[in-house]
Amino acid sequence: MSHRQWKCIQIQRWLICVLIGITTGLVAVIINISIIQLTELKMKIVTQAIEKCVKSACLYQPLLIWITINAGLVMIAALLTVFVAPVAAGSGIPQIKCFLNGVKVPNVVRLKTFFTKVVGIIASVSGGLAVGKEGPMIHAGAVLAAGISQGRSITFKLTFPLFEYFRNDREKRDFVCAGAAAGVAAAFGAPVGGVLFSLEEASSFWNQALTWRIFLCSILSSYSLNFFMSLYHHHGGDLAYPGLINFGKFEGTYEGFELPIFFFMGVIGGLLGALFNAINHKITIFRNKYVTIRFLKVVEVIIVSVVSATIAFMMMFLSAQCNPLGQDINVDLQFLCEDGQYNTMASLFFTPPEDSVKSLFHDPLGSFQPLTIIIFVLPYFFVACWTYGLQVPSGLFIPALLIGAAWGRLIGICMNAICPDCLWSQDVAKYALIGAAAQLGGTVRMTISLTVILIEATGNISYSLPLMTVLMIAKWVGDFFNQGIYDKHVHLAKVPILEWEPPPLSINIHAREVMGTPAVTVREVCLVKDICRVLSDPHNCHSGYPVTNEEGKFRGFVLRSQLLILLKHKVFMERSGPDDRLELAVFRDSYPRYFPLSIVNVSEDEQRCHIDIRPYLNPAPYTISERASLPRIFRLFRALGLRHLVVVNDNFEVVGIVTRKDIWKWGHHGKS
Amino acid sequence: MSHRQWKCIQIQRWLICVLIGITTGLVAVIINISIIQLTELKMKIVTQAIEKCVKSACLYQPLLIWITINAGLVMIAALLTVFVAPVAAGSGIPQIKCFLNGVKVPNVVRLKTFFTKVVGIIASVSGGLAVGKEGPMIHAGAVLAAGISQGRSITFKLTFPLFEYFRNDREKRDFVCAGAAAGVAAAFGAPVGGVLFSLEEASSFWNQALTWRIFLCSILSSYSLNFFMSLYHHHGGDLAYPGLINFGKFEGTYEGFELPIFFFMGVIGGLLGALFNAINHKITIFRNKYVTIRFLKVVEVIIVSVVSATIAFMMMFLSAQCNPLGQDINVDLQFLCEDGQYNTMASLFFTPPEDSVKSLFHDPLGSFQPLTIIIFVLPYFFVACWTYGLQVPSGLFIPALLIGAAWGRLIGICMNAICPDCLWSQDVAKYALIGAAAQLGGTVRMTISLTVILIEATGNISYSLPLMTVLMIAKWVGDFFNQGIYDKHVHLAKVPILEWEPPPLSINIHAREVMGTPAVTVREVCLVKDICRVLSDPHNCHSGYPVTNEEGKFRGFVLRSQLLILLKHKVFMERSGPDDRLELAVFRDSYPRYFPLSIVNVSEDEQRCHIDIRPYLNPAPYTISERASLPRIFRLFRALGLRHLVVVNDNFEVVGIVTRKDIWKWGHHGKS
């Protein structure tokens, strides 16, 4: 490669990031506006029905209308997810986490997944499920990034002659990082939080040039989101318009003596978060066991949707709180209230969930009675537990924030009751915020990226100290009982994800105990027959093989995909001149989906030919001595994102191969 | 190690971080308050002298008094730095950067360095040099962390029987990370920024458990600083008191159409920053060439101090701007003004530099005339250029922010002149802020940690988008001309620091071209005489040696320090039983300062004994094949923080050794 080509590739890298940033922002705008419009439409239809029926005692009619609309929308999401892209279910954060950790997750960054995710999340949020759109937005950003950087779509069988250089795992992973960051930036208006999220999950070592690109990508995503949303809100171009902040602007401050109260709330958040995860864990295990056929999965989603709608409707009945109009800007649903009043419970159910969070944060002190909140939060908690893990795209941030904001506000009301005339207790917003943070921290257990996301999303830095402390406490308390919910789901899916540190007390475990043995090796120059045998061995589906020379010494590493391509192009020594070499482009072109062995036709005659692997193998892969300790191997895997590592003895002969799964098993085993 | 011991060590880790956090905060409080008190005292003395002399035309008297006080204070700083701890000169950020990158920097984390740094920075800031206290605070935090985590002080020959487990490079580096983060948190009130700073510089892969500890450390440092400073400001316990925010609270917002103006300011910042670095580069080269003896170094510092003071004094004369009292809360120095007025220039020179930055940010529109600002900023720019690199502790953040805030305010005044009645142009604070960010970004070129630090230090999140963009633009423009100032100084000091990415176009360079050869090896069992010969070889001062067996096969790696200890304890095969093994504690105990070979007495008789290294060597260090490419080697060094890597051939024989310096040379060579 010449210096000029190198420069050109650098510029392409930046260009791709610009594209990823802008398009991710645009997709977020589309999701946002669709949800707002659909929710408004739904509310209009149901409100009309209620107003018609409230006097003629036919309230079952609006309930039925509501259930039908909700179930219909949710069914679209469920059908798409179950039949088109099952990997689009859930928030997508665990999947992205695994992908960035170095695990191959099938279909995770394909276009059909993107489509399912976007349409599915619009449908499931406006269908009234207890889900948020944030996690899926992150996943959507990641898929966009993968698609743009590769310049091709497998689904549509389209390949543009662009960005060919980036068609390999390492480059793709870097761009997916940027896309996930842009997704966070768009979902929460948190560009710095986005960068941190990516770095935290991507786990490879911090690369400044990459970080700058990710950063640019996040910023552009924020700009493009803010620009289009400001147009939508009729504040065109006013990028500092506070209506763009997800959770509204916090104005207040706090006193030093309130810190212990906040810390106590952190403990509650940790406990409730752990409870949430434990219940969800049980439900997920049950689901994995019994809800296995596709039809049942769709039915379960519809049942949850119907139950959610019915509970919500009943709650509006039960809670008789009516407030004078104008306290809540979001809704003016009269329901059973008198003229000039609105039903507070309805304000929580007939708006996009972000607006409900905003209401709980910012509505004035008296606008929610304690009883209303309790009636709301208890069923919502269990419905949310049930919902996460269904076969629909579903984010977890908003449900957690909603639950936390609700009990946080309750505590704020208590504080106000204790000291009704104090200045500090007038502001319930801060308690709602701390509660929301504690609940979220107790559930997902993310670290500083979460702190930064919350600070950016609330637009107020003065709460940063208490927020951080509360998140830490919630994490500690929660970790005492169980894992974070994403880790739990990764764990349940048995994905060989590597933790942050080697398993404790593994210093005395050595490579020879960890490795898979005997390693299947390939000779430098070998018979086609032998290669076919190795490739078709069902017990050995590694993605690559160590290559040895005649004497059995280790000479390099060759990928399964390379062998397949060599077979397909029949690069046999007997059939070609000494200078016939397959171009790099041929290998790059078939990335990332390689064909199975069965479609390669090798005749009897060809079976006896030889293949010379030497020009194609990686001559100096990372190796490790059989005496190396597990922590040493672990660090190599973790820091370099390896998938396999060849173990050699003192004669440089291959004695085994360590895969990601081998290490993961040890960590897993040590823990249980 | 048992599971219980492992738990115990985990708890100790957290405990140490708690201690580091609190003490760093305390040290920052001491530095802060000392500077405030000394500056006030100085101002009082000079003011009295001026008031006495302003009518009797003896203004040379206060000038002399001022120069004497300044020169005296600065001399203390210079003497300490030159004679006690030269490594304490400058901001300390380049040194910490190198340390965390994996380079051994002598004395960088020793107690005498800490003492010099703290006393020196108090003296040089209150001595009126164009320096800030922020960088040195970070260094101070790092030294504290090293000292606390090791439980010993070499300077005082004290060793506590505490934290012995952590006496090795890897653990110490982790704690120094935490200390640096706590330093940033205390210097800027930016706990998140602190964590990011550490992660960015430490460059090893992101470890979640470590991150949490660093985070706790930063938070505690912020709390302890805020708590004590709120007491000092008579707002005891009010941790949200806005007076604690370094740069005052920003209230305003911005319009979308101002963004291009901000971006343009980013370009100016990049240009001015590059100019600053270029001038400073020339001065540093001159200094390295001619100011070499200690006495001259002290003299240079005093000259700079006298020149700074004289220029400041003359500027107060030249700028005849007098404002009515009360516009600036910091100072009320009448000087040549009429009664009821104060001299604006004096408000920039008689306060701690943070307060000058605050004045430029927040004083109302008319309080500084454009001419005053121009007269201030031009000489200050050059004096600041001259000052950084002197033999005193000196931070660079505040001078850069001061210069940037000055020209930023100028632009704000221009904008106001263009559109005097517009609402958006009433707020000069935002222009001053953007200018400050642009200048800082153009000078130091740090990345997202800087963004977060600025956001946290200004306490306003609504400027985050323009701040980020401006920092990016300033970095791009600056990078077009030269390196960031810290990188420049690291570069001038010829420290083998590794960049973020392998040198471009190095894919065709292989280990055998990079490695040092022939590698000096040691036999598993060898004569004492041979070991002595290897250790005393002046051409080979590697910190370790590959070990081979009789047949020349690679068997492991032994550190120079281990060989020295084995010699000192005379662990000879002829003198000891087969089970006599040196305890791990013996090795740990002599960390980190190992004795030279000369103090080990080996008699003629002993020279003929044998040493069995096998029980002590590292049996499975990372190795690389001689065919490995440079980028592959680079990634191994960078991701794992290696210092040396053994190169082996296909027979597992040692053919060479790659050190950090070898790689650095290639990167260096490729660039120039």
Image (cartoon, coloured by chain):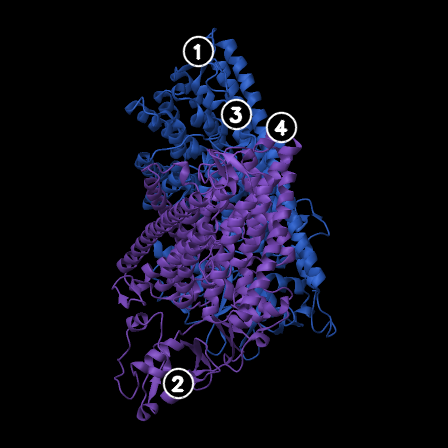
Chain colours: A purple, B blue
Question: In the shown orientation, is residue A147 left or right of residue B552?
Answer: left
x then y, percent, for residue A664 = 55, 69
Q: Amino acid at mark 2?
A: Ile
Q: Nearer the viewer, mark 3 or mark 1?
A: 1
Q: CA distance from mark 4 to mark 2?
A: 80 Å
The N terminus of chain B is located in which quarter? bottom right
Secondary structure beneath disc 2? helix
Q: Nearer the viewer, mark 2 or mark 1?
A: 2
Q: Which mark is residue B70?
A: 3
Q: Nearer the viewer, mark 1 or mark 4?
A: 4
x then y, percent, for residue A306 = 49, 57
Q: Report if residue A527 is visible in the image.
A: yes
Reading the image, the residue beneath label 2 is A531
Secondary structure beneath disc 1? loop
Q: Amino acid at mark 1?
A: Cys
Q: CA distance from mark 3 to mark 1?
A: 24 Å
x then y, percent, for residue B152 = 68, 49
Q: Amino acid at mark 4?
A: Cys
Numbered-mark total: 4
Reading the image, the residue beneath label 4 is A422
Q: Observer-nearest residue: B519 or B558?
A: B558
Are callouts 2 and 3 both on one chain?
A: no
How crowded pointer 2 is (Cα within 10 Å; few <14, some 14-19, many 20+) is rated as: many
Q: Which mark is residue B212?
A: none
Q: Nearer the viewer, mark 2 or mark 3?
A: 2
x then y, percent, for residue B107 = 58, 47
How crowded pointer 4 is (Cα within 10 Å; few <14, some 14-19, many 20+) is rated as: few
